């Protein structure tokens, strides 16, 4: 049995929850789903330039958990950019 997820503190509520390549009809696009916690990790580490330890404290998680979230988020964003997929931000 898997361990239950610890709640993650997310202070950012995105207004835009969907990104897609220009001039490509939505009906033919594949999607990559990005969790709001993954977006928060990218925002804190890559946009706000916080160290991972600081970002982890803000999200009330361990640094190793933040690293796993960040790795997953970056991989998903890279996949969408390289393969021309849409990015859907999953709000909970």
Image (cartoon, grey):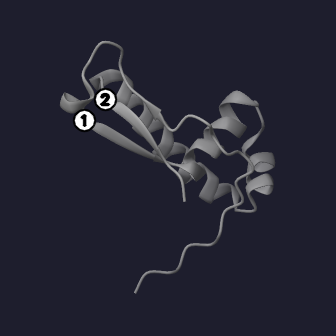
Give the mark count: 2
View extreme (top): residue: 23
Q: Residues within 10 Å of mark 2 (few under 14, many from 20)?
A: many
Q: Residues within 10 Å of mark 1 (few under 14, many from 20)?
A: some
Q: Is residue 83 left or right of residue 52?
A: left
Task: Determine the image quadrant of residue 86.
Answer: top left
Query: Residue, x 41% and y 35% (percent of image)?
Result: 87
Residue 77 in the image: state x and y as whole percent: 44, 33
Query: Residue, x 27% and y 25% (percent of image)?
Result: 83
Could you tell me which secondary element the residue under label 2 belongs to? loop
Q: Are marks 2 and 1 in contact (CB under 8 Å)?
A: yes
Please give the residue where the numbered disc 1 appears in the rendered image: 30
View extreme (bottom): residue: 1
Q: Observer-nearest residue: 67 or 58?
A: 58
Query: Residue, x 73% and y 56% (percent of image)?
Result: 59
Query: Residue, x 59% and y 52% (percent of image)?
Result: 37
Q: Is residue 41 left or right of residue 32?
A: right
Cα distance, mark 2 to mark 1? Answer: 5 Å
Q: Is residue 25 left or right of residue 70?
A: left
Could you tell me which secondary element the residue under label 1 belongs to? loop
Residue 54 in the image: state x and y as whole percent: 81, 47
Residue 63 in the image: state x and y as whole percent: 69, 55
* Image quarter (top left, top right, bottom left or bottom right) of the N terminus: bottom left
Disc marking residue 85: 2
């Amino acid at each position: 049995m898997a361990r239950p997820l610890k709640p993650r503190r997310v202070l950012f509520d995105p207004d835009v929850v969907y990104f897609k390549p220009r001039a490509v009809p939505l009906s033919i696009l594949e999607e990559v789903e990005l969790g709001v916690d993954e977006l928060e990790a990218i925002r804190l580490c890559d946009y706000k330039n916080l160290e991972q330890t600081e970002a982890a404290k803000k999200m009330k998680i361990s640094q190793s958990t933040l690293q796993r979230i960040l790795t997953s988020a970056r991989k998903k964003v890279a996949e969408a950019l390289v393969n021309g997929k849409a990015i859907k931000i999953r709000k909970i």
